[in-house]
Image (tube, rainbow, N blue to C red):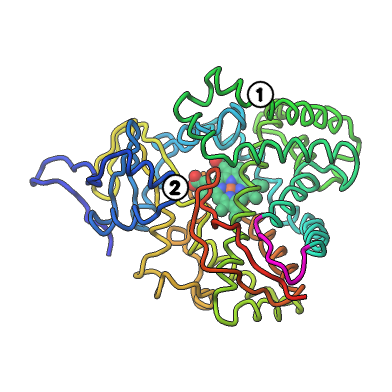
């Protein structure tokens, strides 16, 4: 059932504001910061599909109905800004990051980036990802519990170094950039640092100073790599994303500056690393607790078939979506799902709640990859990658990486679960399994 059209108390009066969860704001902020997602379930059962949570000064208006989410994702990007909503990442990503820009500037950067993620390029990149996954899986200890997130982080880092930056799998440049990238990613994983950015402002001098020791070595390495690659004579034959960005031209025929390329590379690194690694950790955590599923994936991984691995990835991203919501900042008065929103309000489509709706997903809390046999992921009902003009650029890339890594691990044996179900914890911007998706490969 669609949400009611107008939420006004009296006929002819203007629509009302969304209902608020009545709980002290520090408690709400604490629950959100600690991935206690029961706050979303509580608020929805009390107030319905649109409700407001408070983090003190900031109020987030969650929407949990596909029709309302469609309204948000299809509203003009001049009215709802996503870039401003991601402001907290500005220190690391830089001012030209596609994630932080809005309006025309966002569309320019997005168009420059998109060709690098087209199917034909991806097809060439998958063989590199396959080799990287095989090499890493060969190092996984047998008969001993291991954290899937640790393994998939190593794979995701190597994928960035080879597929995104195009550095050869060994060599000084590869190792130096690898170390600097890892340092930045480890640094960002601390929730306290994000909290400090939230409090002091991501562009404040204090926060910039705090980030300098981890950003400087990476920036130095990236700018040197960009300058060197500009001189390469084989850019057109290369398949790495950096080379493609160097060849990209906007509508006016302009190329990207070194600063723009640096900001987009760091954006791809930050947006693509932790997310994909976490998605894989959840996939294995859930898979190994679903009767017969690990065995079925193992059997499929020995063939050319890929249907089950695709369904496992889709189901893991539905039930444990990595990012629980996306943000849009209201720039002009607007009505959504019958409620009134004013400039400065934040609207947050709830990925978590939509994915758990019983009217869309039967037995929604169960991990059942087979549900995807006769159901297609809907544009506004399966939204782990967000939507509209801000939908994740790396969607196909991430799905391909998940499938390749799952198949490579499953080929090594029938995975077994370790310990009890893992609870969600907040890691950087992701909701991650507490023990990193601990599983075991038999000897
Ligand atoms: C399972 C892995 C991933 C998940 C769950 C994920 C999820 C998301 C989400 C929810 C958004 C925001 C969408 C919105 O606001 O509507 C996003 C944006 C973005 N993602 Fe991903 N992502 C993943 C992997 C990747 C990878 C591998 C890359 C690149 C290598 C990437 C690059 C980006 C970029 C550049 C944006 C910004 C798009 C824009 O603002 O126009 N992501 N992603």
Image coords of residue 171 (percent x, y)? 91, 41
Q: Closest to the observer: 219 or 382?
A: 219
Q: Closest to the observer: 75 or 366?
A: 366
Above or below, 7 against 231 in this view is: below
Residue lying at 51% horizontally and 36% vertically, measured from the top left: 192
C-alpha separation, residue under disc 1 versus residue under disc 2: 27 Å
Q: Closest to the observer: 48 or 245?
A: 48
Location of residue 184 (image quadrant): top right
Above or below, 358 against 291 in this view is: above
In this picture, residue 265 sits left or right of residue 89: right
Image coords of residue 159 (percent x, y)? 76, 50
Task: Give the secondary structure at mark 2.
Answer: loop
| One can see residue 49 in this view | yes
Ligand 1 within 8 A of label 1's CB? no
Per the rendered image, the range of residues in magenta is: 140-149
Camera-near label (1 vs 2) is 2
Ligand 1 within 8 A of label 2's CB? no
Image coords of residue 326 (percent x, y)? 45, 46
What type of secondary structure mainly makes up the magenta span? Answer: loop
Image coords of residue 297 (percent x, y)? 66, 76
* Mark 1 or mark 2: whose residue is earlier in sequence: 2
Q: Is residue 145 magenta?
A: yes
State the residue position of label 2.
34
State the residue position of label 1.
212
């Amino acid at each position: 059932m669609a949400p009611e059209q107008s939420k006004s108390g009296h006929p002819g009066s203007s629509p009302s504001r969304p209902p608020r969860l009545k709980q002290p704001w520090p408690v709400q902020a604490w629950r959100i910061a600690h991935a206690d997602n029961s706050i979303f379930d509580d608020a929805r059962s009390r107030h319905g599909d649109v409700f407001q949570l408070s983090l003190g000064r900031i109020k987030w208006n969650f929407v949990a109905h596909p029709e309302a989410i469609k309204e948000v994702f299809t509203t003009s990007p001049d009215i709802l800004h996503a870039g401003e909503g991601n402001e907290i990442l500005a220190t690391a990503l830089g001012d030209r990051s596609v994630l932080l820009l809005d309006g025309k500037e966002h569309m320019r950067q997005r168009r420059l980036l998109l060709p690098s993620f087209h199917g034909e390029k991806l097809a060439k990149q998958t063989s590199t990802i396959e080799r990287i996954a095989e090499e890493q899986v060969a190092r996984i200890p047998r008969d001993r519990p291991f954290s899937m997130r640790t393994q998939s982080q190593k794979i995701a880092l190597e994928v960035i170094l080879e597929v995104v930056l195009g550095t050869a799998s060994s060599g000084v440049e590869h190792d130096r950039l690898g170390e600097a990238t890892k340092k930045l990613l480890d640094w960002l994983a601390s929730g306290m640092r994000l909290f400090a950015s939230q409090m002091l402002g991501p562009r404040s001098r204090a926060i910039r100073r705090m980030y300098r020791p981890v950003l400087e070595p990476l920036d130095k390495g990236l700018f040197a790599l960009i300058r060197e690659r500009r001189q390469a004579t084989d850019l057109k034959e290369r398949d790495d994303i950096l080379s493609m960005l160097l060849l990209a031209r906007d509508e006016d025929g302009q190329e990207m500056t070194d600063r723009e390329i640096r900001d987009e590379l760091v954006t791809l690194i930050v947006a693509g690393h932790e997310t994909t690694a976490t998605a894989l950790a959840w996939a294995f955590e859930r898979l190994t607790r679903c009767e017969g599923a690990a065995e079925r994936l193992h059997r499929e991984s020995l063939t050319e078939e890929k249907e089950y691995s695709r369904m496992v990835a889709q189901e893991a991203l539905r039930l444990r979506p990595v990012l629980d919501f996306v943000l849009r900042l209201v720039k002009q008065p607007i009505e959504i799902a019958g409620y009134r929103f004013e400039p400065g309000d934040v609207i947050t489509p709830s990925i978590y709640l939509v994915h758990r709706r019983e009217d869309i997903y039967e037995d929604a809390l169960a991990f059942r990859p087979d549900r995807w046999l006769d159901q297609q992921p809907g544009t506004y009902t399966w939204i782990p990658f967000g939507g509209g003009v801000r939908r994740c650029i790396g969607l196909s890339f991430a799905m391909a990486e998940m499938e390749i890594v799952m198949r490579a691990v499953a080929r090594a044996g029938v995975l077994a679960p370790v310990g009890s179900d893992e609870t969600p914890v907040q890691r950087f911007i992701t909701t991650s399994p507490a023990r990193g998706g601990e599983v075991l490969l038999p000897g």
